[in-house]
Image (spheres, rainbow, N blue to C red):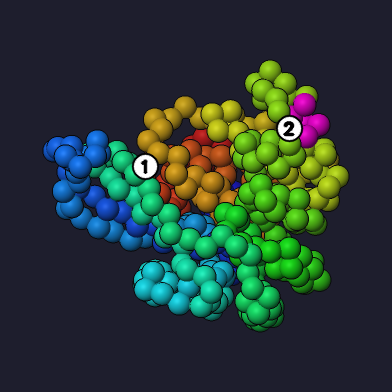
C-alpha cells in the first residue's frame, strides 16, 4: 500500500476521543512599563482569543487528517463550556459525547502573552474525580456512541478527573467485545489503568514517572527496554509507542521493535505535538499501516507541527508530501 492510499483510508473514520476537554484562552498585548504597585509588567491589552484545547486538540488533528472525530468528556454549566461547545460546532466536530456538570467548572488555561513571550498562565479547573451520577451518565453516553458504530477510540488523559477507572475499564471492555482499536495518551495518575489497549503512547518523562524509573535514556537503553517489558506485563497492550523528544520515537509490538530517529528541524514550539502524534498513530493503526510505518509517519507528523508557533493541527497535504519524500 502506497502512502497516498494509506492517507485516503483516514477519510471518514469515526474516532471517539474521550478525555479532558479544555478552553485555551490567550490575552495578548504590549509591555512598556513595570507596575508601581509590584515588580510586575503592565500588559496593555490588544487582543483576546479562545481556542479548543486538551483532548479537543486531538479531535482537531483527526479532523485535519480527514477523519470524523466525536469528542467525549465533561464540561461545566458555564459560559466557558458554552464557548467550547460553539467552537466545536463551528469546526464541525460532533459534541454528542459532551456531558454538562453543575459540580465542575470547564477547564480554562489563560495565557498572557507579550512580544511572543508567555508571561503568565492562569488555570481555572476542577480536578476532583467525577461524581457517581456523572460517571454513570458519561459511561452511558460512551456506550450509546459506540453502539452507533465507530472505528477507533482515543483516551486523552490530562489528570483532570474525567477518566476514572470505571470510565476507562468499561470503555476498553466494550471496545474489546466489538473489536475496536484503542489508543492512549496517558498521564501519571491513571498510567497503569489502561489494561488491554491496542496502542499505549507515553512520552519518556511519563514512562519514567508512571513506572517510577530513573535512568538516562542516552546511556542506558537496556534499562529503558526493560521498563517497556514491565509496562507490557502490567498492561498487556499490543503496541508500546514511546516518544523520545530529540531522540525520535521507539515502537514495539509482540515480535518487533524499532528506534526511529528525529529529523533535523527548526523547532518553534513543541506545544500540542503529542496530540498530533496520537491522532496520526491511531489512524495509521486502524488503516493497516505496519508497526514501523506507524512510528515513522507519526514521528514526522510530530516534527512538522513543532515547526509552527503555538498549538496547531497537522496539515494532511504537508505530511503526505514529507512522508513521500523521506520514507519512500
Residue position for label 1? 308
Q: Position of residue 73 (x, y in %)?
A: 56, 69
- In front here: 131 or 287? 131
The residue at the point 57 percent across, 54 percent down is 158
Where is residue 251 shown, x and y percent of the image? 70, 39
Q: Which residues are magenta?
A: 223-227
Q: Is residue 103 above or below residue 314?
A: below
Image height check: is 23 above or below 295? below
The quarter of the image holding the C terminus is top right
Instruction: Label 1, secondary structure: give it.
Output: loop
Query: Does residue 94 appear in the picture of this structure?
Result: no
Of mark 2 and mark 1, the one earlier in the sequence is: 2
Q: Residues within 10 Å of mark 2 (few under 14, many from 20)?
A: few
Front disc: 2 or 1: 2
Q: Residue furthest front?
A: 37
Q: Secondary structure at mark 2?
A: loop
Residue 224 visible at all: yes
Position of 226 with respect to 277 (left or right) is: right
Amino acid at each position: 500500500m502506497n502512502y497516498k492510499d494509506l492517507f485516503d483510508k483516514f477519510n471518514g473514520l469515526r474516532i471517539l476521543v474521550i478525555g479532558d476537554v479544555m478552553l485555551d484562552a490567550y490575552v495578548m498585548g504590549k509591555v512598556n512599563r513595570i507596575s508601581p504597585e509590584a515588580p510586575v509588567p503592565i500588559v496593555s491589552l490588544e487582543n483576546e482569543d479562545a481556542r479548543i484545547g486538551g483532548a479537543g486538540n486531538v479531535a482537531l488533528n483527526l479532523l485535519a487528517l480527514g477523519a470524523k472525530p466525536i469528542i467525549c468528556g465533561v464540561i461545566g454549566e458555564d459560559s466557558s463550556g458554552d464557548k467550547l461547545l460553539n467552537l466545536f460546532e463551528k469546526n464541525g466536530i460532533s459534541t454528542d459525547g459532551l456531558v454538562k456538570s453543575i459540580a465542575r467548572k470547564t477547564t480554562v488555561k489563560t495565557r498572557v502573552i507579550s512580544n511572543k513571550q508567555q508571561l503568565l498562565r492562569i488555570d481555572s479547573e476542577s480536578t476532583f474525580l467525577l461524581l457517581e451520577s456523572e460517571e454513570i451518565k458519561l459511561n452511558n453516553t460512551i456506550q450509546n456512541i459506540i453502539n452507533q458504530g465507530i472505528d477507533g477510540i482515543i483516551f486523552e488523559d490530562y489528570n483532570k478527573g474525567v477518566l476514572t477507572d470505571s470510565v476507562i475499564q468499561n470503555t476498553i471492555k466494550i471496545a474489546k467485545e466489538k473489536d475496536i482499536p484503542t489508543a492512549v495518551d496517558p498521564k501519571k495518575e491513571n498510567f497503569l489503568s489502561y489494561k488491554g489497549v491496542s496502542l499505549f503512547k507515553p512520552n519518556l518523562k511519563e514512562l519514567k514517572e508512571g513506572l517510577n524509573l530513573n535512568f538516562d535514556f542516552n546511556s542506558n537503553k537496556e534499562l529503558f527496554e526493560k521498563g517497556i517489558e514491565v509496562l507490557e506485563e502490567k498492561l498487556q497492550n499490543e503496541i508500546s509507542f514511546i516518544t523520545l523528544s530529540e531522540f525520535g520515537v521507539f515502537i514495539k509490538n509482540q515480535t518487533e521493535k524499532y528506534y526511529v530517529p528525529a529529523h533535523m528541524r527548526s523547532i518553534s514550539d513543541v506545544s500540542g505535538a503529542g496530540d498530533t502524534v496520537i491522532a496520526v498513530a491511531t489512524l495509521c493503526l486502524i488503516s493497516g499501516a505496519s508497526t514501523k510505518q506507524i512510528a515513522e509517519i507519526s514521528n514526522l507528523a510530530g516534527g512538522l507541527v513543532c515547526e509552527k508557533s503555538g498549538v496547531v493541527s497537522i496539515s494532511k497535504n504537508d505530511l503526505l508530501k514529507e512522508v513521500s519524500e523521506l520514507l519512500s
